[in-house]
Image (cartoon, rainbow, N blue to C red):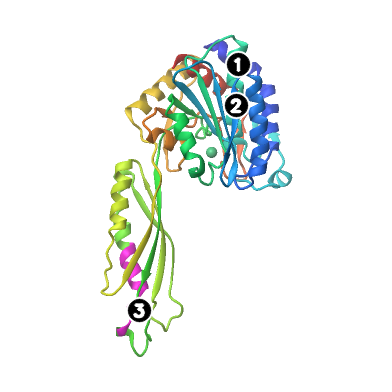
Amino acid sequence: MKDLLNKAEARLPQMIEDLKTLVEIESPSDSPNAVNNLATYLSNRLDKLGVKAKEIPVENGGNVVVGRYGGEGKAIMVLGHMDTVWPLGTLAMRPIRIEGDKLFGPGSYDMKAGLVVAIHTLELLQALDKNPSHPLTFFFSSLEETDCEPYQGVLEQEALNCDYVLDLEPAWPGGAVKTERKGCANYVLNIRGRASHAGADLRKGISAITELAHQIEILNSFTDYERGTTVNVGVISGGIRPNVVADSARAEIDVRFCRLTDGRAIDSKIKALEPHLRGAELEIAGKIGMPPLERTEKVISLYQKAREVASKLGFELGEVSTGGVSEACITSALGIPTLDGLGADGDGAHAEYEHVLLPSLATRTALLAGLLLEL
Ligand SMILES: [Zn+2]
């Protein structure tokens, strides 16, 4: 194992060059052509390593890259996304810079460094003449930051042919992997009341705003911190002027949950909301968007395996639970053991101080290589 780490460390200068190259190919989710440039670059890199890579078109997005390596049978999926939250031109305003051990650049930590780790892990294994325990499926997606739905079916189909999914999303700052992510659901509540003159005829009106206030209290009561279920009414609007009883009001609601069963329970409760004021009408639209990454026995034992590999490499691998969603939620909901946050260490995802801790490129490459050998 130590040999893996030494050899990975020797690759660090090349990994840094590759990271710069990937960051320089800007790839915002909403610029499909830009994402396609990166997809082509990566499928060429995979091809050179003997991975049969193809680009699959995605509606409203760049192509997804899917590559198969090794023989028949159930694979290990090496998962990552190519898109970033940064619009074209961000790089010109905030060029790549290296300060000490850190490389700053848009999309570096989330998650171009993870893609570098994926490529270099296979290169490293080949250089050492070692074969992964399973065939590999590389899946690099194109819309993770905005909406996975257009390619969710393709991801699920590939994942169902895998025994494990290893997601190279950035590590938690400090290096921990993610063994639990909350799922999320979003709703819009539209309330219809009846307008009237606030001075002359208040009683004739049905205030959609008052109704909304009642509904907000009810929605807030669904929050259960113990179970990790939260409901947030984050946006409200309603009414037109102070002297008119509001005939309409609207709320946007964000729900997070650790277990799919909890998410379904809240979903039914929200859809069953009843008006509090006589004559008010509620219209509720929305659904569960992303299932949670549940910290199941399967996830825990995969994490334990990764911990063992890390310990042989000489470091402690921690785990965290987080509120944000990722593609790991999709694959784990299929019952496939999934470990998330195996990418580079650093900090500042989606923020201007986004950066990668460069030495972690080597440790994460050794970790992934070790896992691919031992799983
Ligand atoms: Zn990400």
Q: Which residue is mark 3?
A: 194
Q: Residue at x 47, y 39 (%)?
A: 152
Q: Establish if 90 lies above or below 370.
A: below
Marks 2/1 in contact by CB < 8 Å: the verdict is no
Camera sees residue 100: no
Residue tagged 2: 53
Q: Amino acid at mark 2?
A: Ala
Q: Residue sitting at 35 percent across and 64 percent down? A: 283
Residue 73 image offset from top left, x and y in percent = 45, 18
What percent of the width, then of the height, locates residue 356?
61, 33
Looking at marks 2 and 1 on the same chain, the residue that comes earlier in the sequence is marked by: 2
Look at mark 1 in the image and give the residue it sits on: 124
Q: Residues within 10 Å of mark 1 (few under 14, many from 20)?
A: some
Badge 3 vs badge 2, beta-carbon distance below 8 Å: no
Disc 3, SS: loop
- For label 2, the crowd category at 10 Å Cα-Cα, with few meaning under 14, some 14 to 19 and many 20 or more, is many
Label 3 vs 2, first from the N-terminus: 2
Q: Which region of the structure is painted magenta?
A: 204-216
Q: Nearer the viewer, mark 3 or mark 2?
A: 2
The CA span between labels 2 and 1 is: 19 Å
- Give how far apart the Cα atoms at labels 3 and 2 are: 59 Å
Q: Determine the residue positioned at 49% across, 20% down.
A: 315
Residue 14: in sight, yes or no?
yes
- Magenta highlight on residue 208: yes
Q: Is mark 1 within 8 Å of ligand 1?
A: no
Question: Does the magenta stretch mainly form a helix, a strand or a loop?
Answer: helix
Amino acid type for the residue under numbered disc 3: Arg
